[in-house]
Amino acid sequence: MKKLLSVVLVLTMVLALVPFAALAEDTGYETVTGTIMFNAGHDDSETDHPCPFTYSDAYFTDTAYNYRQDLATVTMAMCLAAGNVADPERYTEGPANLKNFFDQIGFEDFEANKDFVTRPGRDTFGVGIANKEIVVDGEKYTIIAIGLRGCGYYAEWAGDLNVGASGDHTGFAICRDTALAFLKEYLAKHTEINGKIKIWCTGYSRGAAGANMLGGAIDDMIVGGEKLGSNVSLSLNDVYIYTFEAPMGADTAKIGSNVYNNIHNIVNYNDLVVRVAPASMNFGRYGVDHVMPTADFDANYDELKANMLEVFGTFENAGEYRIDNFKYVTVTPGATVDKIISSIKGDKMTQGQFLDKLVDVLFAELGTREDVYAMQGGLQELILPLIGTYPDQWETVKKNLADNAKDNFKELIFNLVTGNEGSSVELVANIILDSLRDAGINDVTAAEAKEIAVQVVKFALPLAVKHPNEIATLLYNIVGIMSAHYGELGMSWMLSIPSDYMLNKQTKSAMPFDDLQRDTWCYNEVKYTYDNGIMNGTKLTSFSPNGVVNRGQVVTVLYRLEGCPSVEGMSCDLKDVSGAWCEDAIIWAYNNGIAKGFNDGCFRADQQVTREQLAAFLYRYADEIIYNGTISVGDGYAKSFSDEASVSAFAREAMLWAVENGIINGTTDGKLNPQGNASRAQFACMIARFEQGIA
């Protein structure tokens, strides 16, 4: 029966290779179903494998700032197709799978840069581009589709280790710069492409880092008034960037703006790759992170997982879903080899939680970015000979190394945690030799293997001595940790999750603030104000939730809620407004009866705001702007507050209204605390509740 099902599946995939077009009933745009071939996999990475997709031009009728599951899913198919064909000897045909994808969906003029058709080197990067004209609301657009190579790139992998001394990750910046230069070259060559364009770009893994940073660069060009080509125009709403399993490569000093939220990063919380280069070294991603289902965040994970596994099982190279097999290992220092492992438990933490801890431990020990930069050359030279000399066996070698490390797990841990450098080198050298020979590589000598082992042990030994449990857990689970990064797993999630999952079940912060965790009491409200451009951080990576709020900040936020209307022709009698940093906001608020001055005729933009003053600002805004002076307030509070009598007379109606409408809920000890200074977190909560419930 199983054999029959396999035959049926293969026949279905073969038939799906012929694109099928249908007219989408609700859009009027044609829908195309087809199959791409891709080079990745759990248990077979030596051949290309089929993956179905569905495409429609209708996916580009919405603003790029709105995540679309249908567009994200077909984009992942494109990013998988953008990997090199599986056989390294066919490197001149590297982009063949990507071209086939574009052919199926009606994109023309496919071109690949020279790096895509030559054997990959340390700093090369493959880029493929095609285009298609579509009509949206009666206007002609040309979609420029850009696929960035993210698998099958062999020696390019060493470029991932090139962090650079400062700023953006140097190795990933090469990807961005190569892609941007080729895009400009493509548009300059194809002068028939003119008028409005849309950019559709994707990449996987290293390619995803390149796509993410390319999206940031294109957004910056648009904001700065710079054009991609002399004949074309491009809007931020038309930059569709979807990345998959992207490591972090952008300088965090650059990524905080909401402008970049047309960049959507789909990541697996259980994947180590998405955590490097680390945030601790000021690396990050442009745009918004969207996290695939995981037991850590989803109460209905079992249901989501069951649906995913149905799809996962249809991939001929899927193998086993290993992520939930994760187990935490504890070590008994000083014990004998047979008793060195004290426990192996599956209920200590999840794989994602462990990886968070591992990255913190690992990079704390590695030191500063400058320390990593100093050692990166040696790491590259350690890896390059194997990848560059044996590209066709490299994936097999990686898998063999993981399997052999686990087979020799106890002895390896014993030698490392006891600080036995000589025995550790000998064992690691044997593991390397066995892994190479099992992959058909027989010309690496024992001396050469030992030289590599010396470098590995030099790196691993101090970590194992200081953090034995983490290193033991890493080695024990290495196969499962590696499997979280394989493409068909991500594609199975994309094909199986509900269309609104990423919108309604988003669990990963899109905010760049280090001082706000997901379990912070004000997190959802701050995120709402940030996502909607109402409040920004005090710095690019800080929101300062406990910071104070001043009068200038309040009128500025209300001014933003109103859309920052022109104040031309308006006058203001307040003495300290001219030249103030929030001058336009004060003038607008003053003229609309929202802000008043003090008896001395000043506004005092920098004076701190109390909770009752903040309520008064919001009350006046609601009365003047929303209800046109017809707002009504009850006679008393619905529930008793021990200090309600201390509310100032000027703020009584405002506080009654704010409590009545859920804008102020009182403190945990049953008080209104009207004269207490409002914190930025409280301000965000009040604004979010006000904007959602009133405005």
Image (cartoon, grey):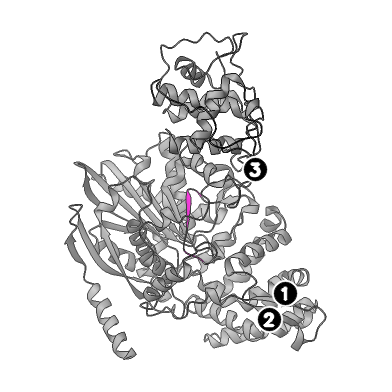
Instruction: Return the x and y of residue 414 as percentages of the image width and height.
Output: 76, 82
**Element at label 2:** helix
Answer yes or no: is residue 371 visible.
Answer: yes
Residue, disc 1: 457
**Above or below for 577 versus 232:** above
Q: Are marks 3 and 2 in contact (CB under 8 Å)?
A: no
Q: Is residue 647 above or below residue 413?
A: above
At x 48% / y 62%, what residue is drawn? 205
- Quarter placement of the C terminus: top left
Q: Which residue is mark 3?
A: 668
Q: Amino acid at mark 1?
A: Val
Q: Nearer the viewer, residue 284 or 128?
A: 284
Mark 2 or 1, nearer chain start: 2
Q: Amino acid at mark 3?
A: Thr
Cβ–Cβ below 8 Å for labels 2 and 1? yes
Q: Position of residue 70 (x, y in %)?
A: 32, 58
Question: Does residue 581 appear left or right of residue 180 in this picture?
Answer: right
Place of residue 144 in the rendered image (x, y in percent of width and height, measured from the top left): 31, 50
| Residue at figure coordinates x 67%, y 80% from the top left | 344
Q: Are marks 3 and 1 in contact (CB under 8 Å)?
A: no
What amino acid is labelled 2 in the image? Val
Q: Which tag, 3 or 1, sits closer to the chain's start?
A: 1
Range drawn in magenta: 286-294
